[in-house]
Image (cartoon, grey):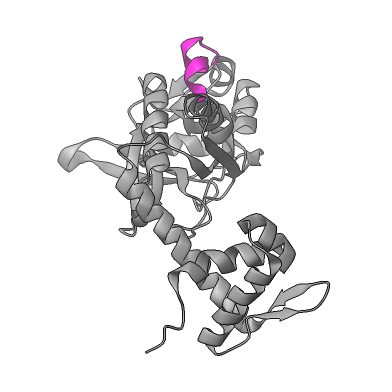
C-alpha cells in the first residue's frame, strides 16, 4: 500500500509554507526550484489532493494544505520535544521559553530572575508576558506560568517555588488616628484598601483564627474609598496612610522592617498564596523548562527567608 505521507514530507512542507514561494524554499533547502516543484508534486500525488495553489508570483495553501501544515508542525514539534527529552541530560538548555507572571510580582521578581537566567544560559530566548489574570491552565500559549496558590488540576505540574504569606498592615499614623483592630470584625470600622487579583472576590477578606478544634475562618466584607487591581499602587496608598491593606509579605516586608508599615491582627491567617511554577505534564522533562524552574526557585529562596 502506497504511503500517503512520508516523514521527509513534513519538514519540507513546513519550510515551503514558511518561505512563501518555490524559489525561496529552494534557497532555504539548497535545492533547485525544479527539485522543490517535483517534491511538492509527488506529495500532492500521494495525498490525492492539491496542497498548494501556485501562480507565477505567489503561492497559497489550499484548505487541505492548511490542514496538512497544522499537523505537520505539530508532529515536528513533538519530534523536537522527544529529541530534547532524550538528550536533555547531555546538552545545555536552548530554544524559546515563554513565561507568564502577574504584573507586580513579575516586574519585581520574575523579570530580574530572567535577566540572570539568560546570562547563565545564553542559548535560551525568553518571552515574558505579564498579565492581571493568569491564563487558563489548559492554555498552551506559555511554557511556564508563575502564579500564586497551587492549582487544583492534575493536568498540569505545579512546583512550589517559595512560601508567601499575606499580611494585614497599615501605617502607625493611620492606626494612631483610627485605632488598631483587635478582631476581624473590627475591620468593618476601618478604611480598607481593596485589591483584586485573579478571580478573587472583590472586597472580601477570609481570615482564620485559632488552631485545631478551635480553628475558625471568618469572611469579612471590607469597606473603603480606594480599590485597584495593581498591587504596587495599593502599597503606595497604604504607605500614604489611607487605610489597612492585605498584601503579600514579599511586597511589604521592607516596609515592615523599617517601620513604615506595621502588621495588623498578626494572629490571623489568610488563604494559601504560595508561589508555584505551573507547566503542562508533557513539558515536565523539557531541558530548558526544568533549568528555568530550578534557577528561579534558587533565586526566590533567599528572598523568602
Residue at 63% x, 22% y: name it: 241
> Where does the N terminus fall, quadrant-wise?
bottom left
Q: Where residue 91 sits: x, y (%)?
A: 37, 36
Residue at 48% x, 29% y: name it: 121
Residue at 70% x, 67% y: name it: 33
> Where does the C terminus fall, quadrant-wise?
top left
Camera-nearest residue between 80 and 262: 80
Camera-nearest residue between 210 and 88: 88
Camera-nearest residue between 138 and 13: 13
Q: Where residue 282 sits: x, y (%)?
A: 35, 56
Q: Quadrant of residue 27?
A: bottom right
Residue at 67% x, 82% y: name it: 62
Region in magenta: 251-260
Lateral position of residue 5 relative to residue 12, left or right: left
The answer to if 11 sits in the magenta stretch is no
Residue 284 in view of the camera? no
**Relative to 305, does residue 297 appear above or below in the rendering?**
below
Q: Where residue 101 sits: x, y (%)?
A: 53, 41
Residue 47 in view of the camera? yes
Lateral position of residue 202 relative to residue 277, left or right: right
The answer to if 255 sits in the magenta stretch is yes
Amino acid at each position: 500500500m502506497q504511503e500517503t505521507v512520508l516523514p521527509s514530507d513534513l519538514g519540507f512542507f513546513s519550510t515551503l509554507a514558511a518561505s512563501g514561494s518555490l524559489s525561496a524554499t529552494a534557497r532555504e533547502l539548497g535545492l533547485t526550484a525544479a527539485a522543490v516543484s517535483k517534491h511538492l508534486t509527488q506529495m500532492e500525488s500521494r495525498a490525492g489532493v492539491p496542497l498548494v495553489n501556485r501562480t507565477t508570483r505567489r503561492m497559497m495553501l489550499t484548505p487541505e494544505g492548511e490542514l496538512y501544515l497544522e499537523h505537520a508542525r505539530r508532529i515536528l514539534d513533538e519530534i523536537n520535544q522527544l529529541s530534547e527529552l532524550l538528550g536533555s541530560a547531555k546538552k545545555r538548555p536552548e530554544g524559546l521559553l515563554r513565561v507568564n507572571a502577574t504584573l507586580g510580582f513579575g516586574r519585581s521578581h520574575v523579570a530580574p530572575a530572567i535577566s540572570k537566567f539568560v546570562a547563565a544560559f545564553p542559548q535560551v530566548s525568553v518571552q515574558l508576558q505579564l498579565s492581571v489574570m493568569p491564563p487558563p491552565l489548559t492554555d498552551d500559549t506559555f511554557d511556564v506560568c508563575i502564579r500564586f496558590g497551587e492549582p487544583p488540576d492534575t493536568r498540569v505540574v505545579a512546583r512550589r517555588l517559595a512560601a508567601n504569606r499575606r499580611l494585614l498592615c497599615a501605617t502607625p499614623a493611620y492606626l494612631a488616628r483610627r485605632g488598631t483592630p483587635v478582631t476581624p470584625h473590627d475591620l468593618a470600622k476601618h478604611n480598607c484598601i481593596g485589591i483584586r487579583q485573579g478571580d478573587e472576590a472583590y472586597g472580601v477578606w477570609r481570615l482564620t483564627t485559632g488552631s485545631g478544634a478551635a480553628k475558625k475562618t471568618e469572611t469579612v466584607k471590607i469597606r473603603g474609598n480606594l480599590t485597584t487591581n495593581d498591587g504596587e499602587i495599593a502599597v503606595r496608598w497604604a504607605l500614604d496612610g489611607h487605610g489597612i491593606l492585605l498584601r503579600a509579605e514579599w511586597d511589604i516586608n521592607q516596609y515592615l522592617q523599617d517601620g513604615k508599615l506595621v502588621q495588623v491582627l498578626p494572629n490571623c491567617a489568610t488563604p494559601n498564596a504560595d508561589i508555584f511554577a505551573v507547566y503542562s505534564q508533557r513539558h515536565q522533562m523539557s531541558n530548558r523548562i526544568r533549568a528555568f524552574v530550578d534557577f528561579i526557585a534558587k533565586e526566590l529562596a533567599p528572598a523568602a527567608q
